[in-house]
């Protein structure tokens, strides 16, 4: 099953044993079919998102897709038939998809199957998922759903999409969570309204989930000097990122834990056999 010569599709599978992640697109579009390469539409952000999340050591082009194997990454599709758009797919196009993905998990043993778009997951398994880590597993292989990278999904901002890719990178790395609270917006009664997080890749704001977690975060952060006693309404938000506008990039609560004031680091690691159990 490794490699792509026998793929019954216009775009060959990029597969090998013991990969870190196998990305599962929905199906080839016409641009990808013509190029015989995954996510070949120049308006598709897949390759840029891989690099932005540090899942790859450099920015690859679609024509370099087989070099992904050296990074521990593979690519396949939930459906093999080429269509102008995913809305042109039929239910029958996904026949056998779940069995094929189960076989990939069993025979090639990737640590993760990452579905690029909810429709790829729904097409394969018949249920519509939420973004992020799924409860279901295929053997020892974990499942993760990402936002679609298609230009048809351009309404979803880049920041939101890259954050989900970084969450996948963090979970795949197996590295422990680490404290990253940098500032807070506090009202006159000393209650924390917003917490600002920052790592080497990004900066974002989140609201505490409860009074208890807010107080706990305040005590820990104040003792370490990482939280501000007062902060104005525009504290550290940066251009176009007002903390009071509701523009909080959504991330699954399993990844950003307000109660514990921690976030999984998305740095990549090559530790053999590294796995994150939930």
Image: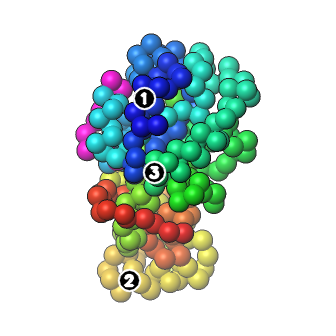
Question: In terms of secondary structure, where does tag 1 sit?
Answer: loop
Q: Going 33% across and 32% down the picture, which residue do you hit? A: 66
Residue in front for this viewpoint, 50 or 180:
50
In the rendered image, residue 43, in percent from the top left (x then y), is placed at 44, 24
Q: Going 49% across and 26% down the picture, which residue do you hit? A: 7
**Label 3: which residue?**
110
Query: What's the mark number on residue 4?
Result: 1
Residue in front for this viewpoint, 165 or 179:
165
Looking at marks 3 and 2 on the same chain, the residue that comes earlier in the sequence is marked by 3
Report whether 57 appears left or right of 100. Answer: left
Q: Which region shows up in magenta?
A: 55-63
For label 3, the crowd category at 10 Å Cα-Cα, with few meaning under 14, some 14 to 19 and many 20 or more, is many
Residue in front for this viewpoint, 87 or 276:
276
Question: In terms of secondary structure, where does tag 3 sit?
Answer: loop
**Label 2: which residue?**
222
Please determine whether, in this image, residue 131 is positioned above or below residue 170: above
The mark lying in front, picked from 1 and 2, is 1
Disc 3 from disc 1: Cα separation: 16 Å
């Amino acid at each position: 099953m490794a490699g792509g010569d026998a793929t019954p599709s216009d775009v060959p599978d990029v597969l090998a044993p013991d990969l870190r992640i196998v990305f599962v697109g929905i199906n080839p579009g016409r641009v990808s079919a013509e190029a015989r390469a995954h996510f070949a539409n120049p308006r598709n952000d897949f390759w840029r998102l891989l690099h932005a999340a540090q899942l790859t050591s450099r920015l690859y082009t679609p024509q370099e897709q087989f070099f992904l194997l050296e990074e521990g990454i593979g690519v396949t599709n939930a459906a093999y038939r080429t269509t102008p758009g995913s809305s042109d797919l039929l239910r029958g196009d996904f026949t056998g998809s779940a069995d094929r993905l189960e076989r990939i998990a069993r025979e090639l043993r990737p640590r993760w199957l990452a579905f690029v778009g909810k429709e790829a997951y729904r097409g394969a398994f018949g249920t519509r998922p939420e973004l992020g880590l799924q409860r279901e597993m295929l053997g020892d292989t974990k499942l993760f759903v990402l936002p679609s990278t298609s230009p048809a999904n351009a309404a979803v901002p880049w920041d939101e999409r890259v954050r989900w890719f970084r969450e996948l990178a963090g979970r795949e790395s197996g590295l422990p969570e680490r404290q990253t609270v940098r500032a807070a917006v506090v009202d006159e009664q000393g209650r924390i309204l917003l917490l600002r997080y920052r790592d080497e890749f990004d900066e974002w704001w989140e609201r505490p989930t409860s009074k208890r977690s807010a107080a706990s975060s305040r005590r820990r952060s104040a003792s370490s000097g990482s939280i501000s006693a007062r902060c104005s309404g525009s504290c550290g938000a940066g251009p176009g990122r007002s903390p009071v506008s509701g523009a909080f990039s959504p991330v699954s609560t399993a990844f950003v834990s307000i109660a514990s004031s921690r976030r999984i680091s998305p740095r990549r690691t090559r530790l053999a056999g590294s796995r994150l159990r939930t």
